[in-house]
Image: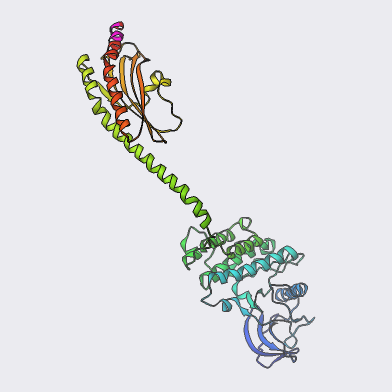
Amino acid sequence: MSIHLNMKPGDIVDSWCLKEKLGAGGNAEVWVAERPDRTESALKILGQIKPTKEPYRRFRAEIEVLRMLGSFPGILPLIDAHLPDQPSRQAPAWLALPIATLIRSSLENDASLRQVVEAMASVARTLAILAAEHGVYHRDIKPENLYQYNHNWCIGDFGLIDYPDKESLTGTGKFVGPIYYLAPELLNDPDNTESGPADVYSLAKTLWVLATGQNYPLPGFLSRQIPQFLISSYISDSRSHMLDLLVEKATHPNPRERPTMKDVADELAAWLEEPPSTSHIPDLSDLQGQITPIMQRYLEAKKRLDQYSTRACQLQRELPDRMQPITDKLSSMMGLPVTFINNPNIVSFAETKRIKQLSDHFCTDTVNFVAQSPLPLDEHNRNISLYGGIVIQFTRAGMLYITGFYILGILGAHRTLWVETQAAEVGTAREAKAIDYILNVMTSSLPTAISEYVDALRMHNP
């Protein structure tokens, strides 16, 4: 049976003198009280006087666990307690805890996200240790049960505690825990539900509330797909998105998909670690002295290679014009057009070994033309062709190798009629002389090339 305590300042409960009422709820009142030795406490006085009823049994379980834990770091320690065999209005059950500051009041409205995470990391670490070392689960995690005491973050109000071999206290159809912070599985079957994942759920909701500054958490699974569920939607912090992921995992509808409390504590501790600083750069003056001349050589080499590439483009534009008299003559003699083709692999048709093989060349271009018989001469549409052209090769050392050639193509087979190479340093007078020489030899070799072409045509009458 519950009674209305109707306590007032100045009343005496055992040796405690009541001074100020802090709150009431859950069949109990909480008062600031003082003993004759000047010890102050938050005195929780139970209004239930029937020891067989659930509130009294829960009160007794809370006292038993607090006595067992003693001065366990991270929880409000038990100063004293009284569990009479026959409680009454004049002799109620009570427990005394230190006077502490609620976490909301300690953090205040201007607390940084880092301060919130520091507090919740401490709470998560305490809960993880309680679970690992004692099998104890709180089941009532919410801001109203978290405090700052002696500069430490502490957990209070163990009235809904779960621990090994604890008797079932919840009546059929009832749920335990704070409704706004309650894991969904505790709504239907609290006595047969794992308490560890439920504490993780409630802690994540508490983290969300304290980080966002809202009065209550939004209900259910806090998915990152919904902007209103994101901590990063309420505050500006470059690392808040990492907490969004943690909250999403910790509020998963399936308890088995949630992280453990140790995982949560480790993640919050990792979030608090300062990213390594990259602002300090050691003295690199010695290395600077070494790298500067090396890079200068590379830049000079690149400049030279760019010049060679530019010269190669110039030659590709100039050589067709300079070979125009040759192609015009060939075209007038055959009565057919002679076309320039872009085929850099033309020299592979014949004796490629006679083309200069350069181990350090970086650029190869070909300017070539072709004269073909007007009709295909076999079932594969192959004909008789006369190829002529110039291969341009530049080396990194600044040398130009210019090779002129004539190649006769007969039904897919190829034979080199003439090939000759001249070399000169790029940009020198000898370069121009080498190009002139190849063009002159190409001109003087034209009759022989045409003669070979005519003989091939004669042998393969259509």
- Number of on-image labels: 0
Magenta stretch? 454-458
Q: Quadrant of the C terminus?
A: top left
- Front-lying residue, 194 or 113: 113
Q: Residue 456 lies in magenta, yes or no? A: yes
Q: Is residue 228 left or right of residue 193?
A: left
68 to 282, vertically: above or below: below
Image quarter of residue 389: top left
- Give x and y (percent) for residue 411: 35, 13
Q: Residue at the front extreme?
A: 429
Q: Residue at the bottom extreme?
A: 10
- Can see residue 175? no
Q: Residue at x 23, y 28 (%)?
A: 321
- Display coloring: rainbow
Q: Quadrant of the N terminus?
A: bottom right
- Give x and y (percent) for residue 319: 27, 29
329 to 56, vertically: above or below: above
- Front-lying residue, 119 or 194: 119
Q: Residue at x 64, y 64 (%)?
A: 265
Q: Residue at x 43, y 48 (%)?
A: 296
- Give x and y (percent) for residue 197: 64, 61
- Front-lying residue, 158 or 412: 412
Q: Is residue 250 left or right of residue 228?
A: right
Q: Residue at x 36, y 40 (%)?
A: 306
Q: Residue 345 lies in magenta, yes or no? A: no
Image quarter of residue 352: top left
- Give x and y (percent) for residue 50: 74, 79
Image quarter of residue 449: top left
- Can see residue 212? yes
458 to 303, vertically: above or below: above
The secondary structure making up most of the magenta span is helix
